Image (spheres, rainbow, N blue to C red):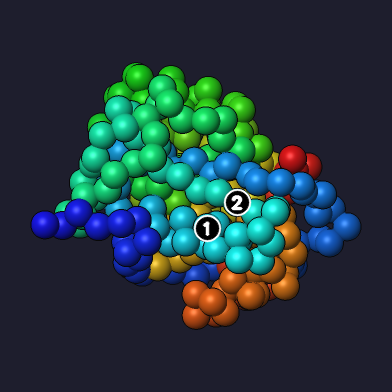
Amino acid sequence: MRHLSLALLILLAACGPAQSEAPVDEASRPALEGVLRAGFVALDGVYNSELMAPYDVLQHSVFRDSLNYIAPFVVSPDGEPFTTFEGITVVPHHSFETAPPIDILVIPSTEGSMTRDLEDAAFLAWLKEAVARARYVVTVCDGAFPLAATGALDGRTATTFPADRARLAELFPAVDVRDDARLVVDGKFITSVGGGMSYEPAFYLVERLYGPEHAARTAEGLVWDWDLGAVPHLVVKESEGP
């Protein structure tokens, strides 16, 4: 029976390189107190790595500070178990109806991100409202497609899985789609390429919120070579934060 806990779902894929920029500006770091709720919206066919790599990074923040950390949870439309693209059954914590307010919204890629999900009116309606309320919105791989479908990326800069950038630009011409970065930050929106690099947007956010030492210690615990200065990324505009 392939019914596993969320902590066992880490799988990796592959991605490609680009240009880099300077680390997060310490002076602009927001002051945080308490717990930030990170809601991962996951539909049937979600890819394992895009769901669980960033989930692990955010969850590990509790080990740095037991009072100020990120508490992740998984939300699905009906709250019922769903199956990842790779065939693992996941039991979400909440449905759209029961989900608590989300501070950090994470949109992982699914096999239907460029097709089925864009035609799901109920999903897009919930997503649009959640995006408007969230302090930060993170997309992993083709999660940028449903986010763009809400109109939230109009006039902004973004990226997605390398092979799908042309399609994102074609479907959403109001979005400045970049192929020179695997991580793009524009205001509260953090878009990324996914695959094996699915850890990166979560590490960026952790460093943005809590500082480089916090991110480095989490990276050490996950045996991940994290160095923001070495990541091909583009910061168009940093969010003013919570």
Q: Is residue 93 visible?
A: yes
Residue 43 position in % (x across, y down): 30, 38
Which image quadrant: the C terminus?
A: top right
Q: Gap in Å between the C-alphas at discs 2 and 1?
A: 6 Å
- Residue 110 in which image quadrant: top left
Instruction: Give the residue type at disc 2.
Output: Ile
Residue at image position (50%, 25%) is: 128
The residue at which mark 1 appears reads as: 59
Q: Quadrant of residue 188?
A: top right
**54 or 93: which is nearer to us?**
93
Q: In terms of image quadrants, where is residue 217?
A: bottom right
Q: Position of residue 239 (x, y in %)?
A: 73, 44
The mark that comes first in sequence, 2 or 1, is 1
Measured along the vertical axis of the image, is residue 138 above or below residue 233?
Answer: above
**Labels 2 & 1 near each other (Cβ < 8 A):** yes
Q: How would you rate the neighbour count of disc 2 (Cα within 10 Å): few for under 14, some for 14-19, many for 20 or more?
A: many
